[in-house]
Image (cartoon, rainbow, N blue to C red):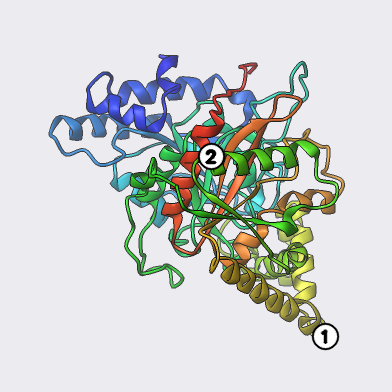
Amino acid sequence: MSELTSLTLKTALEGLDAKRFSAAELTQAHIEALEAARALNAYVLETPDKAMDMARASDARRASGDAGRLDGAPLGVKDLFCTEGVRSTACSRIIGDFIPQYESTVTAKLWRDGAVMLGKLNMDEFAMGSSNESSAFGPVVNPWRADGGNTKLTPGGSSGGSATAVAAQLCLGATATDTGGSIRQPASFTGTVGIKPTYGRCSRWGVVAFASSLDQAGSIARTVEDAAILLTSMSGHDPKDSTSLPVETPDFASFVGKSVKGLRIGVPKEYRVDGMPAEIDALWEQGIAWLKDAGCEIVEVSLPHTKYALPAYYIVAPAEASSNLARYDGMRYGLRVEGDNLTETYEKTRAAGFGEEVKRRILIGTYVLSAGYYDAYYLKALKVRRRISEDFDAAFERVDALLTPTAPSAAFSLGERSDDPVAMYLNDIFTVTVNLAGLPGMSVPAGVDAKGLPLGLQLIGRALDEGTLFSIGAALEKAAGFTGKPQKWW
C-alpha cells in the first residue's frame, strides 16, 4: 500500500473520485507509514481509530454522492490546534494532558470538507523556535540527510512535525502556523511547499496563542496546488475571531497554472545580506531567471527598514507571548506544582512547566513591557513595524509580488545552534517582515545545496492576493522541476 502514501493530495482525491481505492485503504496506508516512522518523532499523538472511523464515514458519503472537497484525505494537525476530544498540548508540559471540548475553526472546516485526522504533529513549544528542539516531546528529525552523512538534521520550526510528516509521506498535507516564518522555513528545510496567508485569512479561534498580532494558520503540502487546495478549505470569516477578515475565499487552486506573463516581480536589495552562502544567492538568481523566462518583468525594489525587522520582531512577539502565556498558572487546567502559598505555586508551576526557550521569551517580553522600558523598546518596535509595512506598501505600488530566499541556509544539525539563541533567531531574517506587515508569503522548493539538501525560494504578495502567489509559485515549481525526496533511512 506504500504507493498510496506517495500520491499528492490532488491525485489522491482524483483516485478516490475514480474509486481506484477507498478512503479506508488510503488512511490505513498512512497509518502504517507513520507507525513505521516513529524514529522521526513527527507525531506526538496518533489517532488511528478515529482516522479509520472518519475514513469509513467518508466512503459512505462518497457512495451516496455527498462527498466534500477533501473527502477521505488523511491529514496531520499541528498540536497548536485544539481538537475536540483529542489531547492538545502545544507541545508544552504546562498544558499537560488537556483535552479540549471544542474544535478549532480551521480544523472544523477541514472535517466539514471530509478530511481525515491521522494525529497531532510535533512542534516547538508554544510555536517558539526555529528548529523544533524546544518541544516537550523531544525534537523532530528531518527525513532528509546530507549526501554521504547520517547526522540528524532539524526540519526547522516551529512547524517541524508538519513539514517532516509531509516530506516523509506520513500524511497528504498538514496544518501549520506561522508567527515569524514557522511555515516557510520548515518547508524550505524539507523540500515542501508552505503558505502563510494574509493575517486574518484563517481564523485563530481554537489555536493556542503565541503572539496574537502575528500568528497565522496555513498549510504545508507537497505541491503548490496541494497547498492551495488545503488553504481554500482552511480559510473563511469567523465571527468568533475579532481579527478574522470578512472576505470571500476564492478557489485558490484555480490560480495554479495561470500565465504569469507581464507580472512585475520585485527583488529587494536589502535581502542581500552579508555572509549569505553563495549557493543561496545563486538559487535566488536562478529563480529570477526562471521568472524572466516565464514572461515576468524583474524590478529591483528597496525595503529600507528590513534591517530593523528582526530586532523589532523579537520585541513584539515576546511581549505578546508574556501576556498570552500568563494564563498558564496551574489554577484551572494542566500542570500544577504545589507551593506553600499561592505565589510559590505559581512560581513552581511555571518553572516546571515551561521550557527554556519559552521562559527566555517570557522574560524578554515582560522586560520590554515593564515600566521605564515600554517606550524605549515596545513602543519603538511598533513604530518600526509600521515603517516596515509602509515599505511594502510602496513596493507593491510598483510590483505584483516579491521574490527572496526563504532561509539563509539549508537544514542544520540538531543541537548545532541550541546554545546560541541569537544564531537561532537569525534563521528568521527573511521571513519575519511578512508577519510584521500581515502579508501572505510562500516557500517553494527550488533546488538543493552542495550536500544535496533542499532549498526554498520565498514569494511575498499583497494583502489578500494569495492567488497571484499560487500562480507565480506554480510557475517557479514547474521551472525548478524539483522532484527530490528524502532517501528512506528510518
* Quadrant where the image shows the N terminus: top left
Q: Residue at x 48, y 64 (%)?
A: 463
Question: In this image, 229 relative to 426: left or right?
Answer: left
Is the residue marked by circle 2 packed among few (<14), some (14-19), or many (20+) residues within 10 Å?
A: few
Q: Position of residue 304 (x, y in %)?
A: 73, 68
Q: Is residue 174 visible?
A: no
Q: Nearer the viewer, residue 405 or 420?
A: 405
Q: Position of residue 220 (x, y in %)?
A: 51, 41
- Image height check: is 224 above or below 202? above
- Image height check: is 145 above or below 181? above
* Quadrant where the image shows the C terminus: top right
Residue under circle 2? 293
Residue under circle 1? 372
Q: Secondary structure at mark 2?
A: helix
Q: Nearer the viewer, residue 137 or 265?
A: 265
- The amino acid type of the residue labelled 1 equals Gly
Is the residue marked by circle 1 packed among few (<14), some (14-19), or many (20+) residues within 10 Å?
A: few
- Quarter of the rendering containing residue 115: top left
- Mark 1 or mark 2: whose residue is earlier in sequence: 2
